[in-house]
Image (tube, helix red, strand yellow):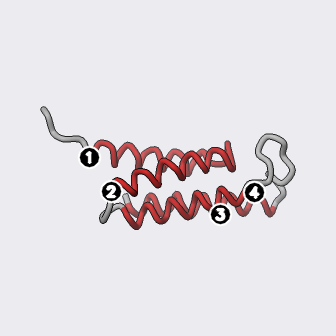
Amino acid sequence: MKILIKVAGILTILISIAAQLTAFIDDSYTMGNIWFIGVLSGILTIISANKIHTNLKISFLLLIVSTVLGVISIAYLFILPGIINLIALLYLFIKNQPNNI
């Protein structure tokens, strides 16, 4: 799971930078010029991957924040990293549930 989350973070950073460099989100009225928040989202995702074994609550919170920031910053370009983040969030949520069967 740690590698999958790191891949999502790297993808977020690369997509944000590539979209800005190709002027895909440069002057868009729907997204604006906030590609750097996408890069911040990728960095938070990578930090979350590194914290997954030491502090699970912080990792869970960082994944939620990075997913929200990714959607705000690069919108529909965040589909693949967003799906990976949601899979990781579901995994962490299910992993923390007590077994009451």
How far apart are labels 4 and 2 at the CA level?
32 Å
| Circles 3, 1 touching at the beta carbon (< 8 Å) | no
Residue at 57 percent across and 60 percent down: it is 42
- Neighbor class of circle 3 (other Cα within 10 Å; few <14, some 14-19, many 20+) is some
Q: Residue furthest right?
A: 27
The residue type indicated by label 4 comes to Ala
Label 3, secondary structure: give it.
helix
How far apart are labels 1 and 4 at the CA level?
36 Å
Label 4, secondary structure: give it.
helix
Q: Nearer the viewer, residue 59 or 12?
A: 59
- Neighbor class of circle 4 (other Cα within 10 Å; few <14, some 14-19, many 20+) is some
- Neighbor class of circle 1 (other Cα within 10 Å; few <14, some 14-19, many 20+) is few
Q: Nearer the viewer, residue 40 or 6?
A: 40
The residue type indicated by label 3 comes to Leu
How far apart are labels 1 and 2 at the CA level?
9 Å
Of the 4 image quadrants, the one containing the C terminus is top left
Note whether 99 is above or below 55 in the view shown. Answer: above
| Circles 4, 3 touching at the beta carbon (< 8 Å) | no
Q: Which residue is mark 1?
A: 96
Q: Which residue is mark 3?
A: 14
Quarter occupied by residue 41:
bottom right
